[in-house]
Image (cartoon, rainbow, N blue to C red):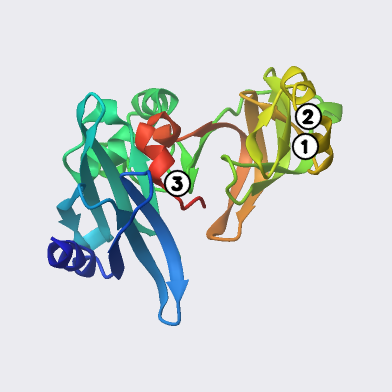
Amino acid sequence: MSNEITSGFSKMGARVKVKDSGERFAVRVDILRDRQGEYFSIRRRADVDVSVTEVTPWNRHLLLRVQALGERGPVESTFLCGRDECHWFVAAIPESAAARTVQEAKDALKPAEVWDSIREHRLPPERRDGRRTEAFVRQGEWFFLPRPELEVKPQDVLEREPIRRGAGKPHVCRYLYRTGGQKVYVTEAYPNGLTRAELRRLPREQVRRHTWVRMVRDAFVYVRGTIEHPDHNPIWLGCWHQVVMNTETQAQAMRQVAFLD
C-alpha cells in the first residue's frame, strides 16, 4: 500500500513518508521539511486504509482517501493534496460532498457565497478554479468577493489587520472593515477564541499563563488594498471585497490535518 501511495505522490512531483502510528487519530496528514525540502507526512494507525483515488499531474493535485473503523462502523475521509503557488498543501474535504475526484474536491471547498458569485458573473467552468476572476479572488483558504457598491466610513476602517483560520499564519489586510460577529479572546492554546464568559470560567492561574488578544469571530468582513501572506504572492483588491473562508472547517477530518497555512 505504501508503494502505491508513494507512486501517486511522485506523479504530481511530491515526496511522501508513510508511517504507522500509535496515536488516537486514525490518520495524521502534515507538511514537513527536511534537507531536500517540503514533503507530505502521513501517520496512520495499523487498522486504517489509505489510498490515492486520483492524481492530476498537470496541475499537481491528488485526492487521498482514508477508511477507518469507527464506533458506529466504517468512517471515510478525503483530503485534497497539491501545490498552491510556492508550497504544498493539504485540505480536508467535507464528508457530505462524497468527493471521488480532484475536481469534485475543489468544488466542495467552495462555499455557497462563492457559487452565488460564480453564477452571478456567469463564470465558465474552465475558469472556476482560477485565483483571480470576475467572481472572486483567492489566496490560500480565503475567497474575496467583489462588493464595489459598499460604502464605509473612514473611521470604521482598520489598517494592517490580520485574518486567520485557527492557529494558521495570518493573512494581513491593508484595509479591513467588519460588522457584527462576536468578540473573543485568543491565545495559542485557544486559537478559535473564548468569549468573555468562557474566559471567566477558566482558573485564574490558567488565564495568567497566556497572553490574550481580543478579536472578532464570525463577523462580516470586507477588505481592500494589499493582502499579504508569507506563503502566497500578495494580491491587490482595488475595491471592497467580502471575505469568506473555504469549507474545510466543515469537515470532521479537519481534526486529522496537522498543517495549517
Identified by mark 3, the residue type is Arg
| SS at mark 2 in the image | loop
**Callout 3 environment at 10 Å: few (<14), some (14 to 19), or many (20+)?**
some
Percent position of residue 111, x then y: 40, 28
**For the residue marked with disc 1, what is the amino acid?**
Gln
Evaluate if marks 1 and 2 touch, with contact meaning CB atoms under 8 Å apart.
yes
Q: Is residue 138 above or below residue 44?
A: above
**Mark sitting on residue 20:** none
Identify the element where label 3 is drawn.
loop
* Of pointers 3 and 1, the one earlier in the residue sequence: 3
Find residue 247 and report its horizontal and vertical position in percent.
Answer: 41, 32
Q: In x, y percent, where is residue 170?
A: 63, 48
For the residues marked 3 and 1, what is the alpha-carbon distance in whole angstroms? 44 Å
In the rendered image, the quadrant that contains the N terminus is bottom left
User: Residue 72's image quarter?
Assistant: top left
Q: Are marks 3 and 1 in contact (CB under 8 Å)?
A: no
| Residue at position x 35%, y 62% in the image | 41
Circle 1 sits on which residue?
A: 206
Question: Residue at label 3?
Answer: 132
